[in-house]
Amino acid sequence: MSVIASLVEAYKRFPDTPPFGYSAEQISYVISLNDDGTVAHVVDLRVEDGKKRIPRKMFVPHSVKRAANITSNFLWDKTSYVLGITAKEAKRTEDEHRAFVEKHINAIGDSTDAGLRAFRLFLEGWRPEYFTGPVWLDEMKDQNVVFALESNRLKNIYLHDSDAAKLLWSRIFSEDEKKNDICLVTGEAGNIVRLHPSIKGVWGAQSSGATLISFNLESFTSYGHKQGRNAPTSEAAVFAYTTMLNYFLDRGSHHRLQIGDASTVFWADAGDKQAAEDAESLFYTSIDIDDLHQKEEISTNRLRETLARLRRGEPIELVEPELAKGVHFYILGLAPNAARLSVRFFYSDNFCDLIRNYQRFVSDMRIEPPPREEYPPLSRYLLETAVLGKRENIVPNLAGEWFRSILTGSSYPLTLMSSVIRRIRADGQVNGLRVGILKALLVRNFNRKDVPVALDPDNINKGYLLGRLFAVYEQIQTAALGSKVNATIKDKFYGSASAQPRKVFPVLDKGSANHLSKIGKEKPGFRIVLEKTVASIMEKMRPDADPFPTSLAAQDQALFGLGYYHQRSEFFKKANNTAISEE
């Protein structure tokens, strides 16, 4: 099923989405009218959100696609259109207000509905200079406003909710210039949309939104067709897919993730509504929640136990039989591209297969000792590949490619290995997150059988042995000089030692002899332990091979990092055990 068709089907399952012809918009104020069109009250609709007030989301007649054109929404809009008032001087304000007034007076005509008649009287009598006094606040400027008849406002019924307004809007909405044809998505006859509505909420895109489907250059068209006629999609299908995307991309929808520069949405399709919701919650909590409050908010005890069992490798057929069959899962990644959106990736498969691929990813990333957070969100791993650990420095394509490989169980992008190695060489941080990434690459991409999860004293890979040896030399230096030295050998030599061992290790070996001599005077027993550790590592080197090769390939550099991490962690483990026993 295509991206658009999948979204159209999803629209049928979500009752919280706007009905056909309407959209969810941010509304800040309601202007309440008396029957004669005079203003009864101006009411602030905004809601508390921490220390600030934010607009209220409301279903209103579908927003128009403006671009550079002057065209108004129906029965709601921002104050420059509704009142001819804006916070900043703008040449278009007068024209915008005129367009709003003319559109509604022509549409309402001689309607006998009390609300519509009062609204028309208001428009005919309003002047921008009336925006003064305690009723009209400066903070109202440029906000979206709706209208209500005062008698209905007290019942929370707005003008656009009235039967007369709905009937009028349905007529206006269907009168736009469209042609009847077969829809490529549904296969049914319908009005073909010329311009597709904007999608809002994609990180990095224009705040006014961007389109997923558009034909704004001659090279995009064929057979003389104009705009949407090049890919005929019915009004109903366009409304459904754009409504669902905007719904999924909404902040706090629990249907979106940020994977690099890709705003990623996901949803499930199942005969059982509860099974679909459980699958969505399970995926959301497993992949990318790094906000503990948010994690607690949507994660029940049952869900947490389910996730824990799956991460231990238990088959989903045993853990959640109802999710193992009959649940289809969709994941769509969108990234900005000028005024349009590009599809970074689209995944569609059985939820059971998705979970198996996720379990394989967890197994690939498993490392001992684990990171501080045993199962970090994907976004946390991605930060380890970025300069200065900043999200904006994550390579866009890398994030999408890695996420896609996790979903499909395919090979991880090789640029992931070079990115991590480069970051380690730049900042010297060899942590569980980075080492886990390197281990995962070695296991999946290169099918390496010699990649251990925890310290493996019997591993004879040269990269792994050299990494362990480097950690021992660092420990010798620390034991001799203390932990407060300005720079350890890791700070000075890790990059060159992991890439060109022959240049560095003879120097480190010579320096360690002096340090061991000092340690022997203060802690002779510890000196023996360190010397034995060095000897045990050197004994694993092949006698017919150079223990310090001229260079190490990328795979061996990754194993160098793994060996260093394991050996370094072993020293910390022994130090902690000694401290505990002394207590």
Image (tube, grey):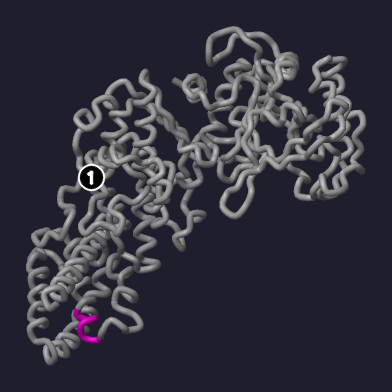
Residue 147 found in image quarter: top right
Quarter-of-image position of residue 181 = top right
Can you give x and y, in whole percent of width and height, for residue 27 in the image? Answer: 68, 37
Graded by Cα atoms within 10 Å as few (under 14), some (14 to 19) or many (20 or more), the crowding at tag 1 reads some
Image location (x, y in percent) of residue 494: 30, 70
Question: From this viewpoint, is residue 485 visible?
Answer: yes
Comparing 30 with 352, the one in front is 30
Report x, y in % for residue 51. 59, 55
Q: Secondary structure at mark 1?
A: helix
Residue 102 in sight from this viewpoint: no
Span of residues in magenta: 476-481
* 1 to 517, vertically: above or below: above
In the picture shown, does residue 497 fall above or below 25? below
277 vs 314, left or right, is right
Residue, disc 1: 363
- Taking the image as shown, residue 32 lies to the left or right of residue 484, namely right
For image coordinates 81% across by 31% down, the residue present is 33
Q: Residue 545: x percent and y percent?
A: 13, 64
| Residue type, label 1 | Ser
